[in-house]
Image (cartoon, grey):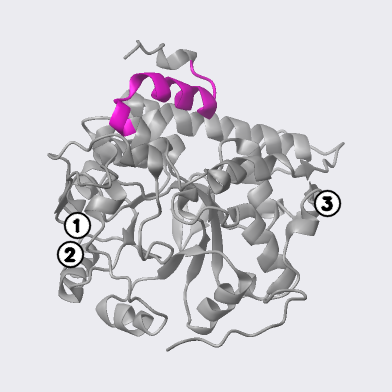
């Protein structure tokens, strides 16, 4: 592996990613950078933001800028959080603990993964006392295990549950399958261990066999009976499901395609946000809406906020910054904060509450955004085999 440049020389998320591609272990890079089959959605997550242009309003006093946010009632220094990501220890020995320390020092929230490298209590105790965390839940086939985990989560003071709904089965991540897994890799939260088989060494596949693929909307009643915390559905990809979530009393939605890692050619998160604005704008008054996938710049964050997101999540970029430990995480947060503030000043606003759709030109992608819950003209109905 080649040497890393000084942290002080890094000035963008793209540089963190390029350095990670050269300096992480072959397996760590394959696991984090890989996505489903032809990588179409992974790449579209990023390129979709590039197709949205700002409409700056000028001759305004933009000397002082406020970027503080509130996410599910929790104060945050910035309108973004660390999305849940598995096995952060593959990047750095301190893994999620370093993420927690960096996040708490800079005042943003970390969402801990069910597939974390460390027990949840170790991660929570790494931050300053009382600092808010979210927790991402994969429901276990053995529901009793999930119930015990949720009980522990509540006792630790976690503030919300992000229920992942877009991964009933793992996607085919070919780059990850081609590199053998280290069979000592474990997830103490999910209580799983890596292995290799005739299909390869894809960590999500070989370690995700416990995930319950029978989960349905009706199971939200069970989840609420287990824990009285706000519930966020992570993985919503259509207006139809956003409406259904609203009808089920969900507290927030995370518009996400799992970083393009499960169903290739599923829609980019920013396109899903536009679909909600077009087909079911009422959901924005009923729930908080978050977006993740492809966010690399402060301008990306601002575009999502302008189009209705309450906050955004970043996963891979934080893992790449973790290559430099806690200091890398903090440096990355500083970079994003500077970029966001600069973008706000140049577009003509001084508070994130002033972000609005009129500041973004979406004409280049409007024809790609669904105009109805179903198909606009194909009207045949399937005859399902029950």
Q: Main secondary structure of the magenta part?
A: helix
Q: Picture coordinates of residue 363 (x, y %)?
A: 83, 51
Q: Picture coordinates of residue 143 (x, y %)?
A: 20, 75
Q: Residue at x 43, y 39 (%)?
A: 316
Q: Residue at x 19, y 65 (%)?
A: 149
Q: Picture coordinates of residue 238 (x, y %)?
A: 59, 68
> Does residue 279 lie above or below 64 as drawn?
below
Check disc 2 and report the residue beneath it. 152
Q: Is residue 252 left or right of residue 223?
A: right
Rounded to the nearest whole Å, what is the CA distance between mark 1 and mark 3?
Answer: 44 Å
Q: Nearer the viewer, residue 385 or 21?
A: 385
Magenta-colored span: 10-28
Q: Secondary structure at mark 3?
A: loop
Instruction: Return the mark for residue 143.
Output: none
Circle 1 Cα neighbour tier, 10 Å, few/some/many (<14 / 14–19 / ≥20)? many
The numbered mark, 1 or 2, whose residue comes first in the sequence reads 2
Q: Residue at x 56, y 48 (%)?
A: 41
Give the number of the mark in front: 1 or 2: 1
Instruction: Return the mark for residue 190.
Output: 1
Location of residue 291 by image quarter: bottom right
């Amino acid at each position: 592996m080649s040497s890393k440049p000084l942290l002080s020389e890094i000035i963008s998320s793209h540089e963190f990613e390029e350095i990670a591609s050269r300096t992480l272990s072959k397996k760590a890079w394959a696991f984090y950078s890989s996505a489903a089959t032809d990588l179409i959605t992974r790449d579209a997550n990023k390129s979709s933001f590039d197709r949205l242009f700002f409409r700056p309003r000028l001759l305004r006093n933009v000397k002082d800028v406020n970027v503080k946010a509130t996410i599910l009632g929790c104060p945050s220094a910035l309108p973004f959080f660390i999305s849940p990501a598995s096995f952060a220890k593959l990047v750095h020995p301190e893994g999620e603990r370093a993420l927690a320390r960096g996040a708490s020092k800079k005042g943003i929230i970390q969402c801990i993964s069910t597939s974390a490298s460390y027990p949840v209590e170790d991660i929570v105790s790494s931050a300053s006392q009382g600092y808010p965390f979210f927790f991402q839940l994969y429901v276990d086939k053995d529901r009793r295990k999930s119930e015990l985990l949720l009980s522990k989560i509540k006792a630790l003071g976690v503030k919300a549950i992000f229920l992942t709904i877009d991964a009933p089965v793992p996607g085919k991540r070919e780059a990850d399958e081609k590199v053998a897994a280290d069979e000592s890799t474990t997830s103490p939260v999910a209580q799983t261990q890596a292995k290799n088989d005739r299909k390869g060494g894809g960590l999500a596949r070989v370690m995700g066999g416990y995930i319950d693929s029978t989960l349905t909307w009706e199971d939200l009643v069970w989840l609420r009976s287990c824990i009285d915390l706000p519930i966020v559905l992570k993985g919503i990809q259509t207006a139809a499901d956003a409406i259904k979530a609203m009808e089920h009393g969900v507290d927030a939605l995370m518009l996400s395609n799992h970083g393009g890692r499960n169903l290739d050619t599923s829609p980019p998160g920013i396109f899903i946000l536009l679909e909600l604005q077009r087909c079911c704008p009422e959901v924005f008054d009923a729930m908080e809406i978050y977006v993740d996938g492809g966010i690399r710049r402060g301008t990306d964050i601002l575009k999502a906020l302008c189009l209705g997101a309450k906050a955004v999540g970043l996963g891979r970029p934080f893992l790449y910054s973790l290559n430099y430990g806690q200091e890398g995480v903090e440096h990355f947060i500083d970079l994003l904060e500077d970029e966001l503030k600069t973008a706000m000043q140049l577009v003509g606003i001084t508070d994130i509450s002033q972000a609005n759709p009129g500041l973004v030109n979406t004409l280049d992608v409007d024809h790609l955004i669904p105009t109805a819950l179903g198909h606009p003209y194909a009207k045949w109905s399937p005859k399902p085999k029950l």
